[in-house]
C-alpha cells in the first residue's frame, strides 16, 4: 500500500489490525527460537503493537520500524513510557530503555540499524502488502537481516476474492515459493480464526487461517 493509505488509517484511528492482547502464537512459539535474554529483535512495520512489550519483557532489545509518527507516539504514551527523540538520516528515532523505534519507510532504513539483530518478528507486516509489492518487501526484510537470524512470521490466509485487503491473503505455497531463497522455513502451526474476526464473518468469508512459521535467514 502507498504511505498515504496508512497515514490516513492512523489519522482516522481505523486500526482494526491493532491487537489489544499479545498475539497467542508469539506467546506460544517465541521460546522455540531459544534466544539469549539480551538478543536484539527487529520488528518491521511495528505499528504500536503490544507484542513489542512482550518481547521487551523477555529481556530483549526491540528495534521497530514504523511509517507513521502517531503510531510511534501512541506506542510510548499508551504504555506510559518516556522516550527521547533524535533524527537519524531521514528517520526519526524514538528510544526508551529497551525499545527503539525508527519512524519512516522500511525501504530506506539503513542496514546499519539492524546489523546486530539476531531475531525478528513479522506479524501483519508481510500480509500488509498487496501481492504486487509483497516480494519487494520480503527482499528488503531479508536485506536488513543478518545471516543466521531467526524469527517468527505470522500470516493470514483466506479466499482473497471474498475481500479486498489489507490484510492480504498469504498462502503456505506463497511463503514456500517466495521466501525459500532467503530463509529456511518451518511451518509451526495453522489455526482457524474466523470466529475471532467479525469483519470477515460479516463479509461471509468462508474460512480464515492464521499461520505461524519459524524462519531462519540463510
Ligand atoms: C497492518 S499494520 C501492522 C502493525 C503491527 N505489525 C501490528 O501487528 O499491529 C501495518 C503497519 O505498517 C506500517 N507501514 C506501512 N508501510 C510502511 C513502510 N513502508 N515502512 C514502515 N512501516 C510501514 C503502517 O503504518 C502500519 O502501522
Image: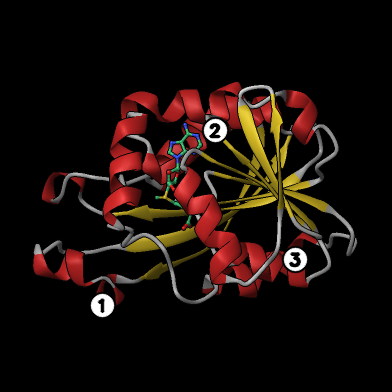
Name the image quarter holding the C terminus: top right
Label 2 – label 3 distance at C-alpha: 22 Å
Q: Position of residue 75 (x, y in %)?
A: 55, 61
Question: In the picture provided, is 197 more to the left or to the right than 91?
Answer: left
* Closer to us: 10 or 154: 10
Query: Does any portion of residue 1 appear in the rendered image?
Result: no
Residue matched to label 3: 56
Label 2 within 8 A of ligand 1 by Cβ: yes
* Nearer-N-terminus badge (2/1): 2
Q: Residue at x 72, y 33 (%)?
A: 145
Does mark 3's beta carbon lie closer than 8 Å to ligand 1?
A: no
Q: Is residue 113 left or right of residue 196?
A: right
Do tag 2 and tag 3 residues touch (Cβ < 8 Å)? Answer: no
Residue 193 drawn at (x, y percent): 33, 71
Q: Give residue 55's quadrant in the image.
A: bottom right
| Position above or below: 28 against 146 | below
Report which residue position mark 1 lands on: 195
Amino acid at each position: 500500500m502507498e504511505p498515504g493509505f496508512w497515514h490516513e488509517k492512523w489519522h482516522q484511528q481505523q486500526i482494526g489490525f491493532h491487537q489489544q492482547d499479545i498475539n497467542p502464537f508469539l506467546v506460544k512459539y517465541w521460546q522455540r527460537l531459544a534466544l539469549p535474554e539480551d538478543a536484539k529483535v527487529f520488528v518491521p512495520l511495528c505499528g504500536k503493537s503490544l507484542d513489542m512489550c512482550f518481547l521487551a519483557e523477555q529481556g530483549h532489545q526491540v528495534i521497530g520500524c514504523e511509517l507513521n509518527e502517531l503510531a510511534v507516539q501512541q506506542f510510548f504514551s499508551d504504555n506510559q513510557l518516556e522516550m527521547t527523540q533524535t533524527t537519524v538520516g531521514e528517520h526519526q528515532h524514538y528510544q526508551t530503555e529497551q525499545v527503539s523505534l525508527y519512524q519512516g519507510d522500511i525501504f530506506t532504513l539503513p542496514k546499519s540499524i539492524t546489523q546486530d539483530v539476531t531475531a525478528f518478528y513479522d506479524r501483519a507486516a508481510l500480509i500488509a502488502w498487496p501481492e504486487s509489492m509483497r516480494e519487494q518487501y520480503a527482499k528488503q526484510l531479508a536485506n536488513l537481516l543478518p545471516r543466521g537470524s531467526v524469527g517468527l512470521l505470522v500470516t493470514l490466509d483466506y479466499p482473497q476474492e471474498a475481500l479486498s485487503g489489507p490484510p492480504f491473503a498469504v498462502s503456505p505455497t506463497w511463503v514456500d515459493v517466495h521466501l525459500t531463497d532467503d530463509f529456511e522455513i518451518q511451518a509451526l502451526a495453522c489455526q482457524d480464526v474466523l470466529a475471532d474476526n467479525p469483519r470477515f464473518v460479516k463479509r461471509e468469508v468462508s474460512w480464515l487461517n492464521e499461520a505461524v512459521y519459524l524462519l531462519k535467514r540463510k
